[in-house]
Amino acid sequence: MKVIAFSGSARKDGNTAILVNAVFKELKKEGIETELVQLSGKKIRGCIACGKCFEKKDGLCAVKGDIVNECIAKMVEADGIILASPTYFSDVSTEMKALIDRTGYVAKANDDMFRRKVGAAV
């Protein structure tokens, strides 16, 4: 079993990563493999609502050149997904919002490909 976490904090190894690692500590006690992807410093842009994911249905976002398709592949492989973000003005970070919008749109276009995965927020 594997759980992947995505930290949307602008600060690498900041408070959000510390909280995710606290969750990971408990998961590791149960023998669950973990991986943390920190969006800090990575190129990521928002959804452009092109609809190509509904046309192609290939499990990928049509927008290339950033981390999103790599994140989608990691989500597909994982049994559980954690989305972690600091709270900025009553919302998640812009990086996390972009990840949620694009991966969610691709998942919907591809028969809800994240269905039956365990999810959590930090």
Image (cartoon, rainbow, N blue to C red):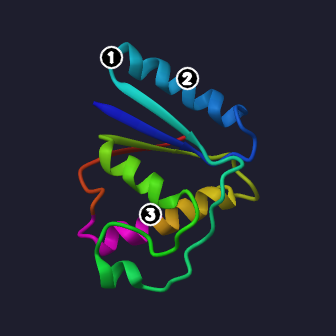
Residue 95 figure quarter: bottom right
Range of residues picked out in magenta:
103-112
Question: Residue 90: x, y in percent?
Answer: 70, 58
Q: Earlier in the sequence, mark 3 or mark 2?
A: 2
Nearer the viewer's eye, disc 1 or disc 3? Answer: 3
> Looking at the rendered structure, which numbered label has been put on residue 103?
3
Front residue (pair 120, 10): 10
Residue 3 figure quarter: top left
Left or right for 25, reference 114: right
Is residue 87 visible to the viewer in this orientation of the structure? yes
**Of the residues shown, which amino acid type is indicated by label 3?**
Thr
In the picture as drawn, the residue positioned furthest to the front comes out as 65
Q: Quick one: SS at disc 1?
A: loop
Q: Residue 74 colored magenta?
A: no
In the picture as drawn, the residue positioned furthest to the top comes out as 29
In the rendered view of the protein, which quadrant contains the N terminus?
top left
Contact between marks 3 and 2 (CB within 8 A): the answer is no
Gap between marks 1 and 3, in whole Å? 28 Å
Instruction: Give the residue drawn at x 44%, y 19%.
Output: 26
**Of the residues shown, which amino acid type is indicated by label 2?**
Ala
Instruction: Identify residue for label 1.
Output: 30
Instruction: Give the residue drawn at x 63%, y 33%.
Output: 17
Q: Is residue 51 above or below residue 112?
A: below
**Of the residues shown, which amino acid type is indicated by label 1?**
Glu
